[in-house]
Image: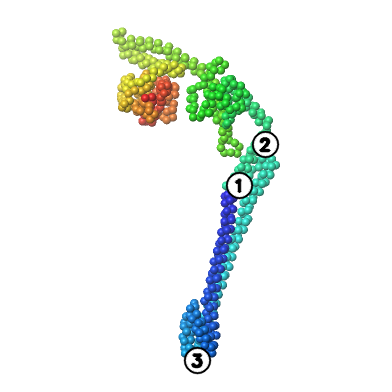
Amino acid sequence: MKIKTKLNAGVGLLFLMIIILSVLGGWFIYQLKKDTQNILVANYNTLQYSRNMLLSLEEIDKQPFAVKEFQKNLNLQSQNITESGEKEVTRNIISHFSDLNENRTDQNLKSVIRKDIAELMQLNMNAIQIKSGIANTTAENAIAVISITGTLCFLIAFILMINLPSNIANPIRELTLSIHQIAQQNYKERVRFEGNSEFGELAKSFNTMAEKLQEYSESRLDKILKGKKRIETLIDNMHDAVIGIDENRKVLFVNDEALKITGLKKDQFVGKLIQDVAVGNDLVRDLIREIINPEIQKKTDSELLKIFVEGKENYFEKEILDINVLPTGEDSKRFIGQVIMLRNVTPFKELDLAKTHFMGTVSHEFKTPISSIQMGVQLLENKRIGELNEEQQKLVIGIKEDTLRLLKITGELLNLTQLETGVVQLNIRPSGISQIVESVIAANKSAADSKKISIKYQIEPNLEFVNADYEKTSWVLSNIVSNAIRYSYENSEIEIKVENDAESQIRFSIKDQGYGIEEQYLDKVFTRYFRIPGTKADGTGLGLSISKEFIEAQGGKISVKSEIGVGSTFYFSLKA
């Protein structure tokens, strides 16, 4: 509980107790006033009237005005009847006084009137005694209730007096002692206050301060300098170029490799804003463009920086790392700068190029003997050369299928080599959509008929042309359709749809009714040499990878959706 809340509660409770005592005292005083006022107004006035009537009765035969005085007091008494039996006695006095007016010397009537007045006085005296007892009871009740309430208020006030100051004073005393310990360089001192009061927040801040002081006191300048030198030496001896900047983009360090690549000196780099360095250096400007403008799309992993270093072409991978640290005693990390790293991947790039050239050379050399084998198979199938028996025909068919498979693999390797070397030629022009689809269906009709699979297609009205390379797009569509035939069940159906998509592009979709692709493999089907575990081992695993390269080279996109037991749908979009 907050200290302010405690104080408000304590003072408010005392204020409430004062109000309760005041209300109780005022209420009982009012009751006493009411009881005594009944005695004074009712009974005392009757006694006063009775006394005056007795005095007037003694003078009634001597003084003429005594009759008027008696009558006056009798009338007042008639209007002040408050007790039981008082009305009958007053009526008797009125009756007897009326008789006395006719015979004022009648002593018996006077005696009777005196008795009536005495009876009236006795009634009021008894009433006074009863009401006095009621007033005494009210006073006793007032004393008891006020005493009990006062005792409770005293106990509550006493408890507040003991606890409230201690709740405030004890944490202050503990905090004061802890501050004395800190002043004596005992930085291990900690304060622990329970609850969510201001003292809890103060204790947290105090402990954070003490922890930072302890960390500072335990550090040594020589350790810091050695650590700094060690890190600088480590960075300078790295084979990768490294540039470090702080949160304000001021260059903190740069190693020798980065200086060699950029062609700058250390005093032109360290201590200056990186954007100021970039003004006079194109390479630095290219390195920090993502830092200056975060909206710029980052380069993909396959895109490398080509930099000439010492007259030689080198390839680098760029990586920008954000440095976030957790300050001592705090809960959230704080951004303190960035590190720009350039990894030299030239040896790997050279190996990759050598591999690509080797694959291209081997694939090209394979085409000649494969073509010769195809020609020999065609000659063997020609009946003019000679008839083949059944076993020989089976061998020729097997050789023909293996030759076609080798030719397909060789073609895929050549396509991949062209893509890797960047020499693939695209002839992008308006191409007929129906021509592409129908030629692909015709090319795969034999394979589909062998599994009794029907291929249907649907082209959205008013769609006639697509801006694409006819041969490459037909190759991609044919590759996806042949895969659909291979992995579909017999007597199933393959559906090809061509329609406009949401991005004003033309989308081709090929839906099969095969087993489907598990979700864990969906993001890998376009990877080179990847084959889904458990499927047939024929093929190189390059078809979908090459399809992806062909579509993206034309500015399109390719994707897949699949559901186990239902089938798969491949999509690719091209410009209208």
Labels 2 & 1 near each other (Cβ < 8 A): no
Residue at image mark 1: 199
For marks 3 and 1, the one nearer the N-term is 3
Q: Secondary structure at mark 3?
A: loop
Labels 2 & 3 near each other (Cβ < 8 A): no
- The percent position of residue 523, horizontal first and vertical second, equals 44, 27
For marks 2 and 3, the one nearer the N-term is 3
Q: Secondary structure at mark 1?
A: helix
What amino acid is at disc 3? Asp
Residue at image mark 3: 106
Looking at this view, is 446 or 177 the one in front? 177
* Camera-side mark, 3 or 1: 3
For marks 2 and 1, the one nearer the N-term is 1
Q: Secondary structure at mark 2?
A: helix
* Distance (Cα) linking label 2 and label 1: 26 Å
Residue at image mark 2: 217
Residue 464 appears in which quarter of the rendering? top left
Query: Which residue lies at the image location 57% right of the left edge and 70% below the top edge?
Result: 140
- The percent position of residue 154, horizontal first and vertical second, equals 60, 61
- The percent position of residue 111, horizontal first and vertical second, equals 52, 88
- The percent position of residue 343, horizontal first and vertical second, equals 55, 22
**358 vs 290: above or below:** above
